[in-house]
Every structure is written in structure tokens, then in C-alpha cells.
Image (cartoon, coloured by chain):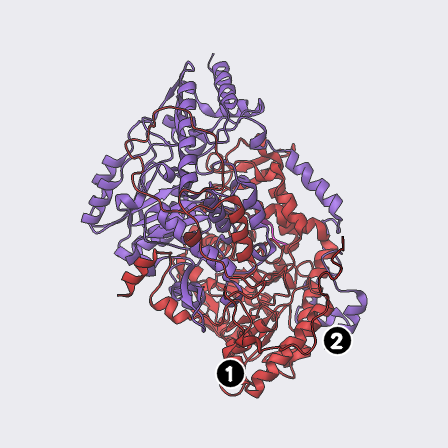
């Protein structure tokens, strides 16, 4: 018998026709690894399930006559289909694991996997928030240890751990300021916020019942100290300042700002979103601030998870510490950890402004953040700030010849580099450059923020990028910037190679479709 | 240091490009007197994986993990079995390490899961629309009250006494600053909920009535009459669901004409984690969609006409509207929403209904066994997977003593309501699919020992 010896060809035939890729259509519409995935409502069915459950005991139900009598209409998938569904969807996402993620002010740094492993230890992941405190001494100890790190790194005497994210931390700080002012019988009504602030700052102040007024920036991209001083007065409860600010610059007058606000009877809130630039090198407490939130999901590497969860502990000065929210952890002289909550607060913490969330905060983020801090240590965290600032300045100086950098002349930046669209031609915009970067394989930088710069592009490489990775990014950014400056029409229709082309956001907002409906319902809605 | 790729040589090269002599030159804007001269004092230096792991394990061991002993705590956080594939899915780096999907062309994975999540939540709640998540149930509850104020332009919210006391506390904290008026009482130990009393509280100044379903003591009651009364005064009914698995067994709040339904989604996909991160659920009737807080994902098409998803109606949000936004929320609970939706996809309607009935019937068996203990009685006529026992003594010391014997017995009402001495004998007990018959017997036996 003869063996078939020819086997699988290993070389493509020569002189084969190579058609234009754009003209090629596949039967499925897919392109190799780029595969569309239907919705679960289109593939699943309500009688299919990916879990096996034991049989329920045979007893009469006691649901008060409210048994569900209508279908829920939630489809199920088998486990195999479920894993594939989400795996396929995941591949349509850009992520820090996939590449450099230069979103200014978002601090998209590498998320160490040790953090994930530690958060999943059953002693942290499988404990209930209302267990007796003697049965959760390790968890309370962890919160206390993390609190010590945060207080030491910021040089502040107290910290509230429960806020759920940055904006929730802002709310915590502003409520403490309001409580402190009310405690001295001072009903001030206005919070001053720089024009360049994150939108959460004015929204938070309003959410807490304050009126919001802008503070202008000067030509160097900093708070205009004279304008601020001129506005201070008996109606001003405080200011919310981001430092380093959203232009990526340190506010050199921060101490003078704090002093001026204090002299006028107000208090100082610092937005700590950009703490990564100074962690381990500068203690915000030395700048005269009264409250600052720390985004554990930025500076301390807890994953962003496609939009959360975050965690926003707030450090407080002596002036605000008595007003911190419940609950919090106290260590007794014998090393026991005590949880100060409603049951125990009266004799401990009578000025607390109260509870702002159920339970005790984002424990799952605390474990990750503490793991990260222990890994870096005091020396490593200082290096974090220095490398983050070094990388950003390297980007700034490597691109300032092709992109307008409005504040580059005033000196170095901190951890992020700010550019404008001033040199673009042919009507090209920051959005076009961003979409061009997508085709180059990058997630774009933060765009159109801060509002004080036209077509702002805020680039934050973070410290976890290698020089080679940053050089590659600079090359891509330079190429797209040159195309934008030259008025390359093709940028207007970018991205060309992403899982989707530009999406119609106007249509989405005009007639919002927020839940899936059966196709016939769509048809009815269209009529 | 393992997370920092730059070498000393790289740093020198980069400083040369920048034109700086040293990294200190990059910090010139920071006044020298506030710059530290070396690593901050009082904290340890960097450590390898093994050392960090050893430290963290030591802390973890000093906790009583629920899975290691009979466990009966609920009251807003429930221990359910999370299928293995859920944790695998949320650890996919493309989900775990993605940002908020502001660049939709390269974030369809996150966006499509959010669209599916919103649809699942809306259907579970029986309302038209749901958002892409809030921090947790307690903050979602306050946001719903604020939303009702915006819609009705009235400032009085009537809270049921069956609303989780932490949710009440959050609302009270906020209302003190926003000058909203809250009507709120502590619960009483009766089998009937306070529905009849609430009816009397609703008037033309009322913005909303807020009812937990099932309530903090586990009781289930029909909210239809409250909805009707509220609507007759142009007020809204806000329903709060802290145990979404229950909606696999009982009517949805939307079926009783609730206008806004919020909840805690931790039960599905998200573990106990000592209270966070959890995931706030938020749904409402279509006509109120533009007053909703938080992110919304919507369907649209791309330039080639293909279906795609984007964040939408963002003119409600802080990054556009600043102080006029409907809420200050930015980061929400995306990854927990993914866990919720993946778990829900695995269950499907069939699995959810089975899971719900399993929880409910196991709870019935447990409740009857525990009520046999001398000195113990069952408060509830109706309940889902959680009920209230009334003991002949303060339950706080009992719960602490049983914890020392490695039985986590439940949540004593005395801890939740320290100022209400009339509630001190109450104990909230939750039973889920993870509770075994042996666990129930262990608790019953231990209680017999305590009551003797």
C-alpha cells in the first residue's frame, strides 16, 4: 500500500490574484478573528440554562399570594455558549492588557494579577459585612492598614474609607466641609471650582446643595490666584481644586490658595484624581488642604473594569476629621479592631455627618490596593510618580513639534501631556485624530477635556509603559498628527479597521433604544 | 521593581530627549519645601510576590469565611453560589482592564454586555428601561428619591419602615444637606408590613413612597394599592429590591405599577466581599428616562449601517452638564454588572425560577425547624429566602457567642437598630441554595443550647 506523501502545502502558489481587501466579502460578514456576536436575546431561550440545581424540598410556598404569574423573558445559554459569548465579546474591547492606554486623568496603568489573586482569598471574598466584628478582625485590620498607608502618603490625620468611587469621595469631602461650617453656625452657600475641573466637581457641589461658581485659569494653565482671592468672602464655603490640575500641571500656589481660602473662613477640597504624579514624593497635607479623595482605581492600580467599580477614600485635616462619615475602623490599645457604626458611634463620634453607603466600602478594592502598595513600598511608589512624570514629559517633548502644546513653554508637565488641535487643517478635529489612532492600534487619549484648551488631547502614558512601547506610541501619534496637520481626508472616516466604523451617536440619543425588543416591537416602534 | 519597565539607562536617554539633567528638574513647579528628600518614612520598602502574599494570607486567615461554617446572614447581602465561569469571564483582561466605553468602536464588548444587562434588569424588574449600573443599592435608592423630586418638583419622600436601615441612613444623611423631607419610622415586629400606614402618609406634597420588596424583615406585600394611591396624588412609587433572586418567584414591582425600581444586584455573580464592591440596579418607566442618573447604553448603527452600541443621553451627565447634571456619578460598577449579567445568562428564566424556588423552599424548611426551638418564634406569614425570628432575649450576645462557636447565625436587629429596644429580640435569618440541612440543624441545636 502506498502512503499519501504529498501532505499539506506549506507555500502559497505564485502569481495568485490578491484582490483589494475592502472588496472582499465573506459569507458571514466576519473577518477571521474579527467575529460579530449576536445578542443573548437572539441566540438564547428562556428554557435553556447553564446551571444545574438540586431539587427543592416539597413544601407549600409562602409568598403571600404574590407568586410570579408573568414570564420574565430572560433567555439562558448553556455554559459552553455562555463562555464563548463573553469571550467573543471581550475580543471587541481595547484594554490595558492589550496595549498602551493613554487616557489623560484616568491613569490606566497595568493591573497586577497578584492583586486579583489576593482579593479572591476566601477570608476576604467570602465574608459578610454584618458578621460579628470578632469574626472579621483580619478584614478590619486590612482596612486599618490601608488607612495608615493613605494617611502616611498624604500626610493627613484621618481618612474615610467608605466612598464607592471618586465622585462619591468628592461628595464625602463636601459634606464634611458643609458639616464643619454648619457646626460653627456658618451657612455659606457657594463652592468655587476652576473652569478646568472634572465635571464631577461642580456636579458634586450641586448634589450636596451648593451653588457653584467658576474660578478662571491664567495663561499658564493654573488657577488665577488674584481672581480667586477677589471672589473669596463670607458666602464662600470652599474651593475644589485639582492638583496636579487637569492641564497636567502642578499648582505652585497651592499653599497660598489654601491660606487665602482659610483666611476667608472657607475650606479646601483637593481632587486627588491626579495623585499618581506626586505619590510618595509630595504629601498633599503639606499644601494646606482639608480633604482629598484618592481614586484607588487610578493611583493604586485596581482595575477599571470597563467603567467600575472604583473606590474613593477621603483623607481629612484635623478640622474635618470629626465630621467623617460612618462607619470606620478603630484600633484599641490591645490591638483589637473595632467598627464604629450606628450601634457604637454615639460615645465615639457624635459629630459624624452620618452614613453615605450601606456597609463599609469597597473591600474588594481595598485588598487589591493594599497588595499593590505592599508590592511597591515607599521606595517603589516614589519611583511610580517619577517614572509617570518622566514618561509624560518624554511624550510632550517628542510631539511638541507636530502638535500644539499650549502650556509646554511654561515648563515641564506632571504625569500627563496636553495638546490642542490648533495645527490641524481641512476641518479635521481632535475626534478625527482619535479615530485615526484607533486604526493604528491604540486607544485614543482623553479628548475635549479640559475645556480650557481647544480640541484638547490629554495624554497620560503612566509609569508601567516601557520606553519601547512609548516610542511606538509616539511614532503612531506623530504619524496621525502629521496627517491631521496636512488635512488628510481619510481621517474623517476613520476608524477603518476597528470592529465598528464610527457610530451614530445622534441617532442613539434622538430615539433611544436602551433595551432589546422583539423584532416585531421594533417594527411597531418605527411606524 | 516588577511593575516598572524603565531601566536606569532608559531614564537617562529620556531625560536627555527632554533636556533635563535629572528627574528633579521635572518637579520644579513643586515648592522644594514640600518635596520629600527620600522614600516616605513609616512605610515598608518594596516586596516580592511571595512576601506580599504571605502578609495578605495572614490577614485573610484572621476572618471566619462564610463557606467554612453554617452561615445565615442576609439583610442586604446574600451568599449565593457563583458559577465558576462567571469569575473566569470577569477576569478576561479585555473586560477587567478596559475603561469606560467612551470610544465605542473599540469597546463593543463592554457596550453589548451593558445593553444585555440593561435589558435583563428591566425585564426582571418589570419596567421599561434600566441603566448601566450604580454603586450599590443604598446609593441607587437615594438617587431614585432625588429623581422623584426632579420629576414631581416636591420634596417629601415617605419611606417604608421595612426599608433597609442603612438605606434609610444614607437617605437621611443626604436629605439633611439637600433639605428634602423624609418621613420614616423604625419597623415593628408584626407579620403585616406597614402598607396601610403608608397609604395615610401620601398626600399632595409627597414626591414618592419608597418600599422595600421583600422588606428588611423578609415580609412580602402587594404594593399595588400604594402605587394607586401615590399616582392619585401625582407621586411616584419607588420599589427597592435587595434580593433580586426573589423576583424569580414573586411578581415584579413593575407589575404592581412601580415607577422607579432600584436594587442591589450583589446576589447574582458578585460575592459577599465584606460589603463591596456591589452593583446598584436602576430601572424606571420609559417616560422618566431623561431624568435617570448614571450611564445608559443605547443601540445605534455605524457608518456602514451595522448595529452597534454607544453610551447615550449623556447630556444628563456630569461630564457634559456639570452642576446641572442629574447626578454626580461617573465611575459606576461595570465589572460587577458584567458578573451579574453573565450569571443571569447562565441561569436564564428557567434557572432563575428554579433557583428562586430552591431558596424559598429551603428557607421554609429552615424557618419551621428553627421555630421549633423553645423560646423562638417566626414573625413572618410570608417571606422569600429570609425571615425574622423572635427570641425571648436580646439576640446580639447570642449572635456573638455563636460566632465564637463557628456558627454565623444571622443579623440581629439590635445591631441594625441600636436605638430601638423593642427590636432587640429580633434575628434576621437568610437561607440560600448554599445552606445545607446540616447547617440548619447546627443552628437549631446551638439555639436550643442558648435558650436552655
The percent coordinates of residue B250 (x first, y second) are 33, 37
* Above/below status of A59 relative to A500: above
* Above/below status of A432 relative to A165: below
Note whether residue B243 is visible: no
* Residue A157 lies in the magenta-colored region: yes
* Above/below status of A196 relative to B203: below
The percent coordinates of residue A497 (x first, y second) are 56, 72
Residue furthest to the top: B452
- Mark 2 is surrounded, within 10 Å at the Cα level, by few (under 14), some (14 to 19) or many (20 or more) other residues, namely some
* Residue B95 lies in the magenta-colored region: no
The numbered mark 1 sits on a residue in which chain?
A
Residue furthest to the left: B232
* Above/below status of A117 relative to A171: above
Depth check, mark 2 against mark 1: the one in front is 1
Residue at image x 56%, y 50%? B90
The percent coordinates of residue A376 (x first, y second) are 71, 53
Depth order, front residue of A416/B239: B239
Q: Which residues are magenta?
A: A155-160
Can you tell which mark lies on residue B170?
none
Depth order, front residue of A100/A235: A100
Can you tell which mark lies on residue A428?
1
Residue at image x 50%, y 64%? A28
Residue furthest to the right: B9
Query: Chain B shown in which color?
Result: purple
- Mark 1 is surrounded, within 10 Å at the Cα level, by few (under 14), some (14 to 19) or many (20 or more) other residues, namely many
Residue designated by label 2: B20
**Secondary structure beneath label 1:** loop
Residue at image x 63%, y 39%? A121
Amino acid at each position: 500500500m502506498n502512503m499519501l506523501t504529498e501532505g499539506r502545502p506549506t507555500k502559497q502558489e505564485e502569481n495568485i490574484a490578491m484582490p483589494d481587501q475592502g472588496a472582499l466579502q465573506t459569507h458571514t460578514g466576519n473577518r477571521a478573528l474579527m467575529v460579530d456576536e449576536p445578542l443573548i436575546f437572539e441566540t438564547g431561550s428562556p428554557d435553556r440554562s447553564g446551571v444545574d440545581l438540586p431539587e427543592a424540598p416539597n413544601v407549600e410556598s409562602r409568598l403571600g399570594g404574590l407568586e410570579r404569574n408573568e414570564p420574565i423573558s430572560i433567555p439562558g445559554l448553556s455554559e459552553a455558549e455562555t463562555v464563548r459569548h463573553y469571550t467573543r465579546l471581550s475580543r471587541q474591547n481595547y484594554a490595558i492588557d492589550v496595549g498602551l492606554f493613554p487616557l489623560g486623568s484616568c491613569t490606566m496603568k497595568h493591573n497586577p494579577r497578584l492583586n486579583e489573586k489576593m482579593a479572591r482569598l476566601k477570608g476576604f471574598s467570602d465574608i459578610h459585612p454584618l458578621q460579628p466584628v470578632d469574626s472579621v478582625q483580619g478584614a478590619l485590620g486590612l482596612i486599618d492598614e490601608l488607612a495608615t498607608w493613605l494617611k502616611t502618603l498624604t500626610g493627613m490625620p484621618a481618612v474615610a474609607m467608605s466612598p464607592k468611587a471618586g465622585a462619591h469621595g468628592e461628595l464625602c469631602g463636601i459634606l464634611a466641609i458643609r458639616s464643619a461650617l454648619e457646626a460653627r453656625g456658618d451657612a455659606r452657600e457657594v463652592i468655587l471650582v476652576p473652569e478646568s475641573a472634572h465635571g464631577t466637581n461642580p456636579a458634586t457641589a450641586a448634589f450636596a446643595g451648593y451653588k457653584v461658581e467658576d474660578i478662571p485659569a491664567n495663561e499658564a494653565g493654573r488657577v488665577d490666584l488674584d481672581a480667586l482671592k477677589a471672589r473669596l468672602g463670607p458666602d464662600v464655603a470652599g474651593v475644589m481644586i485639582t492638583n496636579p490640575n487637569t492641564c497636567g500641571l502642578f499648582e505652585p500656589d497651592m499653599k497660598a490658595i489654601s491660606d487665602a481660602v482659610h483666611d476667608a473662613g472657607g475650606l479646601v477640597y483637593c481632587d486627588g484624581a491626579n495623585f499618581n504624579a506626586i505619590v510618595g514624593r509630595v504629601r498633599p497635607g503639606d499644601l494646606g488642604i482639608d480633604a482629598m479623595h484618592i481614586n484607588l482605581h487610578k493611583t493604586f492600580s485596581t482595575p477599571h473594569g470597563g467603567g467600575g467599580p472604583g473606590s474613593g477614600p477621603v483623607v481629612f485635616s484635623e478640622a474635618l476629621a470629626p465630621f467623617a462619615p460612618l462607619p470606620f475602623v478603630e484600633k484599641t490599645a490591645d490591638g483589637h479592631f473595632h467598627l464604629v457604626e450606628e450601634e457604637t458611634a454615639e460615645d465615639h463620634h457624635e459629630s459624624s455627618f452620618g452614613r453615605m453607603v450601606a456597609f463599609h466600602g469597597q473591600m474588594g478594592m481595598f485588598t487589591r490596593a493594599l497588595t499593590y502598595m505592599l508590592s511597591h513600598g515607599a521606595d517603589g511608589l516614589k519611583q511610580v510618580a517619577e517614572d509617570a512624570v518622566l514618561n509624560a514629559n518624554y511624550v510632550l517633548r517628542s510631539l511638541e513639534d507636530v502638535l500644539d502644546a499650549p502650556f509646554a513653554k511654561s515648563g515641564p508637565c506632571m504625569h500627563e501631556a496636553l495638546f490642542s488641535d490648533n495645527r490641524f487643517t481641512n476641518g479635521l478635529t481632535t475626534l478625527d485624530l482619535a479615530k485615526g489612532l484607533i486604526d493604528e492600534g491604540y486607544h485614543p487619549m482623553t479628548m475635549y477635556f479640559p475645556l480650557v484648551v481647544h480640541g484638547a488631547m490629554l495624554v497620560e502614558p503612566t509609569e508601567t509603559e516601557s520606553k519601547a512601547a512609548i516610542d511606538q506610541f509616539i511614532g503612531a501619534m506623530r504619524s496621525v498628527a502629521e496627517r491631521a496637520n496636512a488635512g488628510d481626508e481619510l481621517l474623517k472616516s476613520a476608524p477603518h479597521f476597528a470592529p465598528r466604523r464610527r457610530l451614530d451617536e445622534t441617532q442613539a440619543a434622538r430615539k433611544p433604544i436602551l433595551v432589546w425588543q422583539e423584532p416585531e416591537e421594533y417594527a411597531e416602534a418605527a411606524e | 521593581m516588577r511593575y516598572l519597565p524603565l531601566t536606569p539607562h532608559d531614564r537617562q536617554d529620556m531625560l536627555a530627549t527632554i533636556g533635563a539633567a535629572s528627574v528633579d528638574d521635572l518637579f520644579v513647579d513643586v515648592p522644594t519645601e514640600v518635596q520629600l528628600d527620600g522614600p516616605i518614612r513609616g512605610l515598608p520598602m518594596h516586596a516580592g510576590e511571595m512576601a506580599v502574599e504571605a502578609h495578605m494570607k495572614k490577614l485573610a486567615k484572621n476572618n471566619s469565611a462564610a463557606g467554612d461554617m453554617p452561615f445565615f446572614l442576609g439583610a442586604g447581602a446574600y451568599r449565593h453560589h457563583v458559577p465558576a465561569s462567571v469569575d473566569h469571564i470577569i477576569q478576561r483582561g479585555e473586560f477587567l482592564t478596559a475603561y469606560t466605553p467612551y470610544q465605542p468602536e473599540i469597546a463593543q464588548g463592554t457596550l453589548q454586555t451593558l445593553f444585555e444587562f440593561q435589558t435583563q434588569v428591566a425585564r426582571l424588574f418589570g419596567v421599561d428601561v434600566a441603566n448601566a449600573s450604580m454603586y450599590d443599592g443604598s446609593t441607587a435608592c437615594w438617587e431614585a428619591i432625588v429623581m422623584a423630586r426632579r420629576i414631581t418638583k416636591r420634596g417629601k419622600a415617605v419611606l417604608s419602615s421595612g426599608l433597609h436601615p442603612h438605606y434609610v441612613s444614607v437617605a437621611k444623611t443626604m436629605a439633611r444637606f439637600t433639605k428634602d423631607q423624609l418621613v420614616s419610622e423604625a419597623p415593628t415586629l408584626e407579620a403585616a408590613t406597614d402598607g396601610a400606614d403608608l397609604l395615610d402618609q401620601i398626600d399632595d406634597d409627597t414626591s414618592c413612597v419608597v418600599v422595600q420588596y421583600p422588606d428588611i424583615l423578609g415580609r412580602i406585600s402587594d404594593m399595588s394599592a400604594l402605587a394607586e394611591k401615590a399616582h392619585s396624588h401625582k407621586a411616584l412609587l419607588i420599589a427597592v429590591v435587595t434580593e433580586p433572586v426573589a423576583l424569580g418567584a414573586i411578581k415584579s414591582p413593575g407589575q404592581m405599577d412601580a415607577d422607579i425600581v432600584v436594587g442591589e444586584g450583589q446576589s447574582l455573580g458578585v460575592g459577599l466581599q465584606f460589603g463591596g464592591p456591589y452593583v446598584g440596579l436602576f430601572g424606571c418607566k420609559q417616560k422618566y428616562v431623561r431624568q435617570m442618573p448614571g450611564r445608559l447604553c443605547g443601540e445605534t448603527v455605524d457608518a456602514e449601517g451595522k448595529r452597534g452600541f454607544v453610551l447615550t443621553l449623556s447630556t444628563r451627565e456630569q461630564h457634559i452638564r456639570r452642576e446641572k447634571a442629574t447626578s454626580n456619578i461617573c465611575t459606576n460598577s461595570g465589572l460587577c454588572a458584567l458578573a451579574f449579567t453573565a450569571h443571569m445568562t447562565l441561569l436564564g428564566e428557567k434557572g432563575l425560577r428554579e433557583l428562586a424556588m430552591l431558596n424559598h423552599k429551603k428557607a421554609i424548611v429552615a424557618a419551621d425547624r428553627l421555630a421549633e426551638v423553645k423560646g423562638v418564634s417566626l414573625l413572618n406569614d410570608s417571606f422569600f429566602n429570609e425571615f425574622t425570628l423572635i427570641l425571648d432575649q436580646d439576640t446580639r450576645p447570642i449572635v456573638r457567642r455563636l460566632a465564637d462557636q463557628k456558627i454565623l447565625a444571622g443579623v440581629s436587629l439590635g445591631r441594625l437598630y441600636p436605638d430601638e429596644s423593642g427590636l432587640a429580640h429580633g434575628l434576621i435569618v437568610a437561607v440560600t441554595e448554599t445552606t445545607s440541612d446540616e447547617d440548619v440543624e447546627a443552628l437549631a441545636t446551638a439555639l436550643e443550647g442558648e435558650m436552655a
